Amino acid sequence: MVPPPRPLIPKHVAPKTLILDLDETLIHSMSKGGNMSTGHMVEVKLEKQHAILYYVHKRPYCDEFLKKVSLWYNLVIFTASVQEYADPVIDWLERDRKYFRARYYRQHCTFRNGGYVKDITFVEPDLSKVMIIDNSPISYFLHEDNAIAVEGWINDPSDLDLLHLVPFLNGMRYVTDVRTLISLRMGDNAFA
C-alpha cells in the first residue's frame, strides 16, 4: 500500500508580524476598589500623581496562546493605553519569557472619531505580512482587512476566544497575503 502524499508545507517560512491589543484582548484590569479587587497587582505612577494600584487578570488561555504564537510570529503589543500603565502589565505577562519584539502605546495612536486608531504600518509597512487582534473596531479602523476581531473580555472564566484562534493563526503562517484569508474567515464572523 502506498502512503498518502505529504502536504506541501515549506520547511522555513519567514515569520509574519502579529500585533496584539492589551486591555480586554489579553487582560482586564481594574483600579483598587473595583469589582475585581483580586488578581495580580500593578502599581502605576502617572506623571506627578500618586501611584494607582491596578488588579490585572489574564484572559483564559492567555499564557498558552502567547507561548504558542510566539513560536510562529514576531509578536508586538499595540495598546491605546499610556506607557506608564502598559509597561508594568506587559512586563508581568512576559515575566517567564520574552514574547514581544516591540511595544507601541497611546502616543503611537492617532485620535480620530472619538477613539485611538492604530496605524499598523508603523509596525510593518508590508500589509500582506501583518495582522492585528483587537476587541475595538475603532482601533483597526485604518486596516480592517488586517484585523482579527475578538470579543472584549472582562471576567468570563469560560472564554475560549484565544484558544480558538490558535489553529487559524497556525494556518496563517503559510499564506502569501494574510488579508485574503482574514477576509474569508471574518466573513463568517467567527471571532466578532
Image: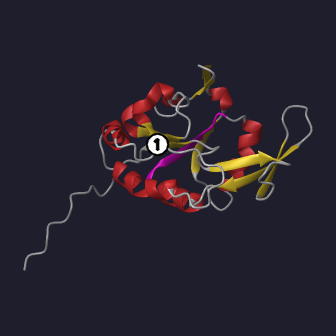
Q: Is residue 65 left or right of residue 95?
A: left
> Looking at the picture, how far across and down is residue 163, in whole percent?
49, 59
Q: Is residue 103 left or right of residue 170?
A: right
- Give me the residue at 50% from left, 54% from top: 161
- Determine which residue is flagged by label 1: 192
Front residue (pair 21, 158): 158
Q: Can residue 177 be spotted in the picture?
A: yes
> Looking at the picture, how far across and down is residue 8, in whole percent?
21, 57
Q: Secondary structure at mark 1?
A: loop
> Looking at the picture, how far across and down is residue 57, in whole percent?
70, 55
Q: Amino acid at mark 1?
A: Ala
**Residue 175 appears in which quarter of the rendering?**
top left
Residue 60 drawn in magenta: no
Q: Is residue 125 above or below residue 185?
A: above
The part of the chain drawn in magenta is 72-80
Residue 77 drawn in magenta: yes
Q: Is residue 99 left or right of residue 127?
A: right
Q: Is residue 74 above or below residue 160?
A: above
> Looking at the picture, how far across and down is residue 76, in whole percent?
55, 43
**Residue 38 appears in which quarter of the rendering?**
bottom right
- Give me the residue at 67% from left, 27% from top: 107
Front residue (pair 80, 7): 80
Q: Is residue 109 above or below residue 96?
A: above
**Residue 11 appears in which quarter of the rendering?**
bottom left
- Color theme of the render: secondary structure
Q: Residues within 10 Å of mark 1 (few under 14, many from 20)?
A: some
- Give me the residue at 63% from left, 21% from top: 114
Point out the residue furthest to the bottom here.
1
- Give me the residue at 60% from left, 50% from top: 26
Q: Is residue 143 left or right of residue 103?
A: left
Quarter that holds the N terminus: bottom left
